[in-house]
Image (cartoon, grey):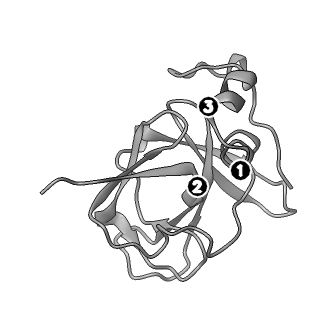
Amino acid sequence: MAHDIPASSDRAYDVSKTEDEWRGELSAAEYHVLREAGTERPFSSPIETDTTEAVYACRACGSELFRSDTKFDAHCGWPAFYSPLAEDRVEYIDDTTMGMKRTEVRCANCGSHLGHVFQGEGFDTPTDLRYCINGISLSQQPVQG
């Protein structure tokens, strides 16, 4: 079930646009995930298992969020990272929309929905966290040699 992201008047973001402006800049699928907190189909993102050395930025505003050196294959259907580029790049929101308590991850620069973060799943990563991020919410920017 999708839920609308609070209007920018609920929190001031560096990038603030009207929903009509977002609709004009994003595809319908991007808008659904980024602005309505939707979820892309599992295993539909080509970047889930891509091993390109890259920076991953918010597709809505371009803010750099994750790096390939924290990306791992969690076999979960979505790109997974064990840490954001820096803690101030993302924000965390309690999410109880699916009848359970989860932690939603949003871009701290524009408030767009990225996915969720899970803890304690036993992955062999330095943080024991899995940032399960919709691939459609990211743009992959390969690192130049």
Q: Amino acid at mark 2?
A: Ile
Task: Name the mark nearer the viewer: 2 or 3.
Answer: 3
Instruction: Give, as a three-letter code, the residue at label 1.
Output: Ala
On the image, the x and y values in percent for residue 15 come to 53, 22
Instruction: Tell me if 98 is positioned left or right of 43 in this view.
Output: right
The image shows residue 133, relative to residue 113, as above or below, that is below
Q: What distance separates the C-alpha of mark 1 from that of mark 2?
A: 8 Å
Q: Residue furthest left?
A: 145
Q: Identify the residue position indicated by label 1 in the image.
A: 29
Residue at point 32%, 63% (across, down): 68
Do callouts 1 and 2 mark residues in contact (Cβ within 8 Å)? yes
For the N terminus, the image quarter is bottom right
Please name the residue that numbered disc 2 is placed on: 136
Gap between marks 2 and 3 measured at Cα: 14 Å
Circles 2 and 3: CB distance less than 8 Å?
no
Label 3 amino acid?
Glu
Residue 30, placed above or below residue 6: below
Closest to the observer, 128 or 10: 10
Q: In this rendering, is residue 119 above or below 87?
A: below
When the figure is inspected, residue 41 is found, relative to residue 59, above or below; the finding is below
Q: Is there a contact, CB below 8 Å, between mark 3 and mark 1? A: no
Q: Which mark is residue 16?
A: none
Secondary structure state at the residue bearing disc 2: helix
The image quadrant that residue 12 belongs to is top right
Mark 3, residue position: 25
Q: Secondary structure at mark 1?
A: helix
In the image, taking residue 102 as reference, residue 109 lies left or right, namely left
